[in-house]
Image (cartoon, grey):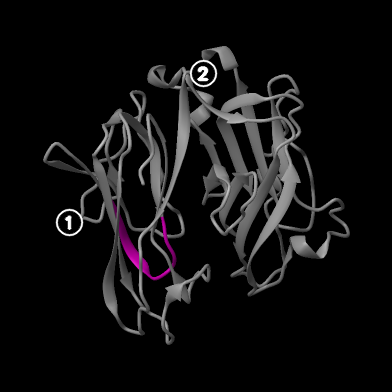
Amino acid sequence: MAECGITTKYAGDEYCILPPPPDKGFQLHMGPSNYDNPEAQYILQAGEEITSDFPVTSTNDKDIYFYYRQYRQRTGAHHNIITSGSGGDSGLGQRIATFNVLSEDYPADGVVPPEDQDVGISLPAHTRINVSLHSINTSEKTELREVWVNFWYRDASQVKEPVTEVFSIAPMGIINPGDHVTTKGSCTVSGAGRMLWAYIHRHANTVRAQLWHNSGGKKDMVYLSYSWEDVLQLDYSSTIMNPVGDDTTMKEGGWSGVLATKAGDTFNWECEVINKQSTALAFTNNTYTGEMCILDSEMVGGGCN
């Protein structure tokens, strides 16, 4: 935080981070070329909400693997989906990063747990990348849309377990004003491995999001969250102790330790929605007048389809 020493008239200067050394990684930066006269696509007016795609090219000049990522984005950003190849917000291409918060490192502080020392994500040289940025400005001032993501390389000879990104959407219908409904989703694990982290992406009318792991007749609650703005993301590793979630006291939390999976296991999740708007909710990116319930995660040993 505050590594760059930039001073602009926009909120969020402190989120700028410096790139890794060239032999250690690369930075994906999406933002204006001139802070005094920023291009129109990076400006977010007061009260404006927009989702747009920004195509870029990765700067690695050879095929690499990465795992540790540092995410930073200015205020006003709601979600950020980064895909390699084609795609964008349509869901095509391979997701290589996704995040909902303004500042986060994964794994925390760059410390890779013992069980993940051989984990990595591949990225060919000079890959076309798409940054899908959903922004909403609830302030009375103009904001700047800007994102910094550092990708730190891993030694290719050490990578034995490739990562699969999970992006699974719970189906939903129209939710009328005043309706109180629960949207449910599920997916089936395709191979033995483990879930590395998870969160459930949703919008302003969702009052609770919950995820369960079902294996061998046993059902474990592994994620419970109530705040849609400050979205809870849980890491599942031998080095992280998560708070215990409690639905009776509305305490956010979930599973602690390695979350092992095997083929045929299922994950079930749900979003409890109360439509507090005067219009019906549909599956859209609109924060207040649209809803969605999406399991976002990374796994090794197979995905969850």
254 or 1: nearer the eye? 254
Look at 36% across and 47% down and name the residue there.
Answer: 305
Query: Main structural element of the magenta stretch: helix, strand or loop?
Result: strand
Q: Position of residue 30 (x, y in %)?
A: 73, 48
Q: Is residue 215 left or right of residue 302?
A: left
Checking the image for residue 263, the label placed there is none
Q: Residue tagged by mark 1?
A: 248
Q: How many neighbours does mark 2 have within 10 angstroms: few (below 14), some (14-19), or many (20 or more)? A: some
Residue 248 placement (x, y as % from top left) = 17, 56
Q: Residue 229, percent across and down?
A: 46, 59
Q: Report the residue at 29% width, 40% height from top.
A: 243
Quadrant into which the N terminus falls: top right
Furthest-top residue in this view:
157
Asked which secondary structure carries label 1, the reply is: loop
Query: Most extreme residue toward the bottom, as rendered?
Result: 278
Q: Position of residue 114 (x, y in %)?
A: 40, 17
Q: Amino acid at mark 2?
A: Val
The span shown in magenta is 201-211
In the figure, 40 relative to 118: above or below? Answer: below
Residue position marked by numbered label 2 in the rendering: 159
Is 208 magenta? The answer is yes
One can see residue 294 in this view: yes
In the depicted structure, whether residue 93 falls above or below residue 174: above
Q: Earlier in the sequence, mark 1 or mark 2?
A: 2
Q: Is residue 111 magenta?
A: no
* Residue at x 75%, y 60% (from the top left corner): 42
Amino acid type of the residue that numbered disc 1 sits on in the rendered structure: Thr
Q: Is label 2 in a helix, a strand or a loop?
A: loop
Front-lying residue, 21 or 163: 163
Left or right: where 105 falls relative to 232: right
